[in-house]
Amino acid sequence: MTKLVISGTAKTYSEKLAALDADTLAKVEAIKAAILAKDKKVHERISKKCATYNLGRRVLAKISIIGKSVRLHFAIDPAAEEYAKYPIKDFSDKASYKDVPAMLRISSDLAFRRALKIIESL
């Protein structure tokens, strides 16, 4: 049996953000601005894997970057009727996403507009 050799380290959120193309980076910045504009008390926390946006102790959203796509996790019920028209995936079975179980992948202009509509409804 052959041995699997893994070398290197995983990129951090900041490194992945810096490596994005200009259009995708502008979308991420617009989403970030929309979340922070919800309330004065919304704060951003950047960790190794993602950016988390909290209102007090309540998590509103998380932004993570996987490859070239941006994933936006919301603190909404993914099975709610009002969000049925959006392609939201349910991540409630994962422990790290129990507070933000609804995931929307931002890979197009339509997905970006949908994300802004969901942010308005938070």
Image (tube, rainbow, N blue to C red):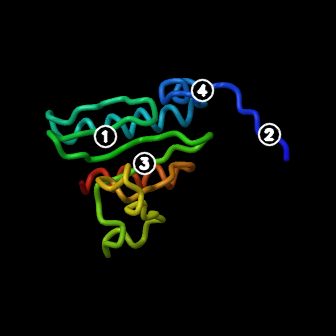
Report the mark closest to the observer, 1 or 2.
2
How far apart are the alpha carbons under marks 4 and 3? 18 Å
Query: x and y percent of residue 83 in the render?
Result: 35, 68
Sooner in the amino-acid sequence: mark 1 or mark 2: 2
How far apart are the alpha carbons under marks 2 and 3? 36 Å
- In terms of secondary structure, where does tag 2 sit? loop
- Out of 22 and 66, give the one closest to the viewer: 66
Left or right of 1: which side holds 80? left
Query: What amino acid type is highlighted by mark number 2?
Result: Lys
Q: Which mark is residue 3?
A: 2
Residue 41 in the image: above or below residue 115: above
Q: Quadrant of residue 66?
A: top right
Left or right of 54: which side holds 62? right
Query: x and y percent of residue 85 in the render?
Result: 42, 71
Report the mark closest to the observer, 2 or 3.
2
Query: x and y percent of residue 11 in the render?
Result: 57, 28
Sooner in the amino-acid sequence: mark 2 or mark 3: 2
How far apart are the alpha carbons under marks 1 and 2? 47 Å
Q: Which mark is residue 19?
A: 4
Residue at horizontal 18 percent and vertical 41 percent from the top: 55
Sooner in the amino-acid sequence: mark 4 or mark 2: 2
- In terms of secondary structure, where does tag 3 sit? strand
Sooner in the amino-acid sequence: mark 4 or mark 1: 4
Residue linked to disc 3: 72
Query: What amino acid type is highlighted by mark number 3?
Result: Leu
Mark 3 near mark 1, Cβ–Cβ under 8 Å? Answer: no
Sooner in the amino-acid sequence: mark 3 or mark 1: 1
Residue linked to disc 1: 34
